[in-house]
């Protein structure tokens, strides 16, 4: 029986032979060349060993990725830990600042109102007008209050206006 009758002139068959010991597989190559069978055996790394090495490489990459993720999480936690006290401080300081500004404005308005009341207690409208003119020119009355009083003084006729008689 001639092998060439059953197979083409050139045929190569690779056979993997594995022993019971892990990673001890060898590759046998059966080649039929011109009717002759040639068996070659190779001591190359086994597929299992290559698979194991690839899995180890993959796990090492996974560890690197996990370490980078942990570092970024730590940075994020540090950033949050630093920003939270700053935000809390701003939330405490801002209302206090606005409250003090409003309180100063209220005290200023009360002060100006008291000055105006004292300046018109003369009983004479012309003297009250002179007192109000002095308060606006000296800067004791400012802003909208001063401009309204100046407009009143410009349009006022002598002898008319508010003059409050002192209570007895």
Image (spheres, helix red, strand yellow):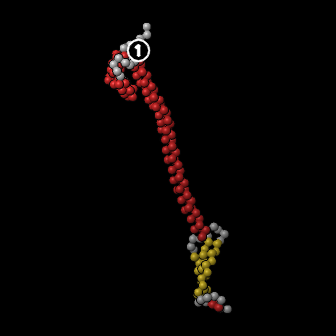
Q: Quadrant of the N terminus?
A: bottom right
Q: Is residue 47 above or below residue 143?
A: below
Q: Disc 1 designates what residue?
A: 164
At numbered mark 1, what does the secondary structure look like: helix, strand or loop?
loop
Q: Quadrant of the C terminus?
A: top left
| Residue sitting nearer the eye, 149 or 73 | 149
> Which residue is most to the top?
168
Q: Residue at x 65, y 91 (%)?
A: 5
Q: Is residue 110 above or below residue 123?
A: below
Q: Residue at x 51, y 53 (%)?
A: 68
Residue 39 horizontal/vertical position (percent): 60, 82
| Residue sitting nearer the eye, 59 or 50 | 59
Mark 1 surroundings within 10 Å by alpha-carbon count, few (fewer than 14), some (14 through 19), many (20 or more): some
Q: Residue at x 60, y 70 (%)?
A: 47
Q: Residue at x 57, y 71 (%)?
A: 45
Confirm whether residue 167 shows in the render: yes
| Residue sitting nearer the eye, 24 or 5 | 5
Residue 166 horizontal/vertical position (percent): 41, 11
Residue 36 horizontal/vertical position (percent): 60, 88
Image-based side of 85 in relation to 11, left or right: left
| Residue sitting nearer the eye, 79 or 22 | 79
Image-based side of 134 in relation to 92, left or right: left
């Amino acid at each position: 029986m001639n092998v060439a009758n059953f197979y083409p002139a050139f045929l190569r068959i690779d056979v993997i032979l594995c022993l019971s010991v892990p990673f001890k597989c060898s590759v046998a190559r059966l080649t039929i060349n011109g009717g002759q069978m040639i068996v070659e055996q190779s001591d190359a790394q086994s597929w299992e060993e290559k698979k194991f090495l690839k899995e180890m490489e993959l796990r090492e990459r996974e560890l690197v990725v996990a370490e980078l993720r942990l570092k970024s999480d730590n940075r994020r936690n540090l950033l949050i830990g630093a920003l939270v006290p700053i935000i809390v401080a701003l939330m405490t300081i801002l209302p206090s600042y606005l409250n003090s500004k409003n309180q100063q404005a209220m005290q200023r308005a009360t002060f100006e109102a008291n000055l105006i009341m004292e300046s018109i207690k003369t009983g004479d409208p012309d003297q009250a007008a002179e007192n109000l003119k002095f308060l606006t020119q000296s800067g004791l009355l400012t802003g909208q209050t001063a401009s309204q009083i100046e407009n009143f003084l410009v349009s006022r006729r002598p002898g008319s206006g508010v003059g409050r008689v002192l209570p007895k």
